[in-house]
């Protein structure tokens, strides 16, 4: 599962959704979906604009959690590395 850290990053900087919209030019819908972590897909342009605004890397804005739990036994079939922890 991919976790979006937009809400946390906005909170740290005391930004509102309207601030992010104004600074990035992204639509309210895009920012709100990312903020609430309900987005199913995101344009690379949106990711780029958010990374520029927050002066961060993609891996700081998004993180993958528990790859092993998502794939279950299929990770062994595909010879994928399993996560530790």
Image (cartoon, rainbow, N blue to C red):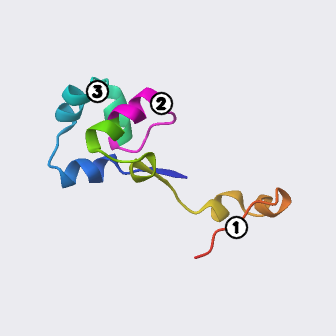
What secondary structure is found at the residue carrying circle 2? helix
Give the labeled residue for mark 3.
28
* Residue at the image point whose x is 23% and y is 47% from the top: 10
| Quadrant where the C terminus is found in the figure | bottom right
- 26 relative to 11 in the view: left or right: right
The answer to whether marks 2 and 1 mark residues whose Cβ atoms lie closer than 8 Å is no
Q: Is residue 47 above or below residue 77?
A: above
Q: Is residue 54 above or below residue 48?
A: below
* Mark 1 to mark 3 CA distance (whole Å): 37 Å
Quarter assignment of residue 37: top left
Give the labeled residue for mark 1.
82
Q: Mark number for residue 44?
A: 2
What secondary structure is found at the residue carrying circle 1? loop
Q: Mark number for residue 20?
A: none
**Residue at the extreme right of the image, as rendered:** 77
What secondary structure is found at the residue carrying circle 3? helix
Q: Pick whichever of labels 2 and 3 is earlier in the sequence.
A: 3
**Residue at the extreme bottom of the image, as rendered:** 85
Q: Locate residue 9, reporting x and y percent.
A: 27, 51
Residue range (magenta): 35-49
- Tell whether position 46 is magenta: yes
């Amino acid at each position: 599962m991919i976790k979006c850290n937009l809400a946390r990053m906005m909170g740290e900087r005391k930004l509102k959704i309207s601030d992010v919209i104004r600074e990035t030019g992204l639509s309210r819908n895009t920012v709100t979906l990312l903020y609430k972590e309900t987005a199913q897909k995101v344009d690379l342009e949106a990711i780029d604009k958010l990374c520029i605004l927050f002066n961060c890397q993609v891996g700081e804005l998004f993180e993958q959690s528990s790859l092993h739990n998502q794939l279950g036994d299929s990770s062994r079939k595909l010879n994928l590395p399993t996560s530790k922890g």
